[in-house]
Image: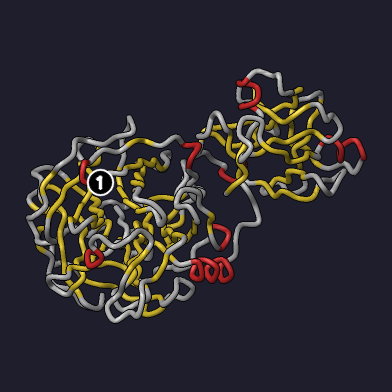
Amino acid sequence: MKRRDLLAAVGGATAGALILPGAAKAATYSGYAMAYFTESPTMAGASYRVHLAVSGDGLNWTPLNQNAPVATPTLGSGGLRDPFILRKQTGGFVVIATDLNGTDWAYQSQYLHVWDSPDLRTFTGYRLLKVHSLATHAWAPEAVWDPARSQYAVVYSSVVGGRNVLMVSYTTDFVTATTGQVFFDPGYDAIDGNFVTVSGVNYMYYKNNTNSTLLGTRSSSFNPGSFSVYTGAITPGRGVEAPQIVKSNTAETWQMWGDTWSPNGRFFCWQSTNVAGGSWSLLNDRLYTQPLNSKHLGITPITAAEMSALTTRWGTPAWNRIKSYNYPDRYIRHANSVGRIDTYPFDPYQDQMWTLVPGLADSAGVSFRSVNYPDRYLRHSNYAIVLAANDGTSTFAGDATFHRVAGWADSSWTSFRSHNFPDRYLRHSGYVLRIDPITSSSAAAAKQDATFRVGY
């Protein structure tokens, strides 16, 4: 239910560049901004507002504003899903989103939430945009510039003839729009249109809502009814939705993100060097990290200056999450005061959030302070890792201090050496954390167990 704003007007422009009408030169992109809302398995992390994250490589993301919202809807349902960022032809951005607060699927809105933003640091002109007059919803809006019409095509899903189809309304200002018409109808329930233009050909990926798979279509124009399916079903082995194609800023490579439909799900990411061929390879979770509790992402490329300004304005998290190398869908957490790795997502989601403070026994090391129990730290006790309150002793300080070194399995990752048992390293065994001796002659599996990625 989202899309990348690689505008149709660019056609075969070089990677990382976008030429706007009247611009003296192309903007060079070196990063990305992501919009999303949040949910977690028990809905403890639900926030139906605009959240932002940034990334330098388009794969590993840093939530802004401590993963709190940056814009809040107050009209319509008072909540949103599926926020989408469009860089406008004239510069600046517009943010549009579904008018739906939570999971009240019976709620029917003919409107979209809209904000203007010059820089994604301020959001102004908040309003509702009416896109149709049907007794049905307008879900998962995306917008793309249609150069033949000199208008933006706003594509969303609504029920027509008893099933969801993709509809389109046209606008020049996101203040008023034409009455919706059918844009794409494959003959079954379809939602979540997502656009990218490559070498003058327009591609739209969408969700087959009858079996939760993704399919690709293409057309030489953006005319309603002109897109035809050219791929087989794309799936990670379970239900997926919300395709979002993102072009690398530095290579002829594309990533396509997908989201599982339930709060218990997570993002998946595929890669392709040939969008025209319709072939996508599913990436290992090791290669990417989504923002905490994020749902239904929308990504736009940004310049280095824009990314710097965003992090300055909103700040980066004061906490970290720590991913397992050989079980990259699992993160270090505490549960019943035991340190372990569990499959993301889970609740309480705060159990996986850690403040890495200077080591209690040696400031050159680190100690893992719990975010939701800030008087407690991870420590080893009889070599097992537990969460315990700091008793102020030198023994506790030593047990709770670790030194970051190059990862045993991958030097670009991290291993944590025990301060007071320097031949032992933090590792998981049966998903439970402990410290064990690791040497260059240790088995490859043990080295992988002792390797982690510190991120968000």
Q: Position of residue 448 (x, y in %)?
A: 61, 27
| 198 over 288 or under it: above or below | below
Circle 1: is it few (<14), some (14-19), or many (20+) Cα within 10 Å? some
Residue lying at 68% horizontally and 28% vertically, measured from the top left = 427
Q: Is residue 172 left or right of residue 395?
A: left
241 shown above or below 123: above
Rendering coords of residue 255 (x, y %): 36, 47
Residue positioned 66% across, 30% down in the render: 408
Q: Quadrant of residue 444?
A: top right
Corner quadrant of residue 125: bottom left
Q: Residue 279 or 342: which is nearer the viewer?
A: 279
Q: Position of residue 2 (x, y in %)?
A: 31, 55
Q: Quadrant of residue 411?
A: top right
Disc 1 on helix, strand or loop? helix
In the image, 289: left or right of 216? Answer: right
Nearest the viewer among 100 and 175 is: 175
Residue at the disc numbered 1: 275
Chosen colour scheme: secondary structure
Report x, y in % for residue 359: 81, 46
- Along the horizontal axis of the image, is 300 left or right of 217? right
In this rendering, the count of numbered labels is 1
Dot 1 amino acid type: Val
The residue shown at (71%, 23%) is 440
* Residue found at x 50% / y 34%: 329
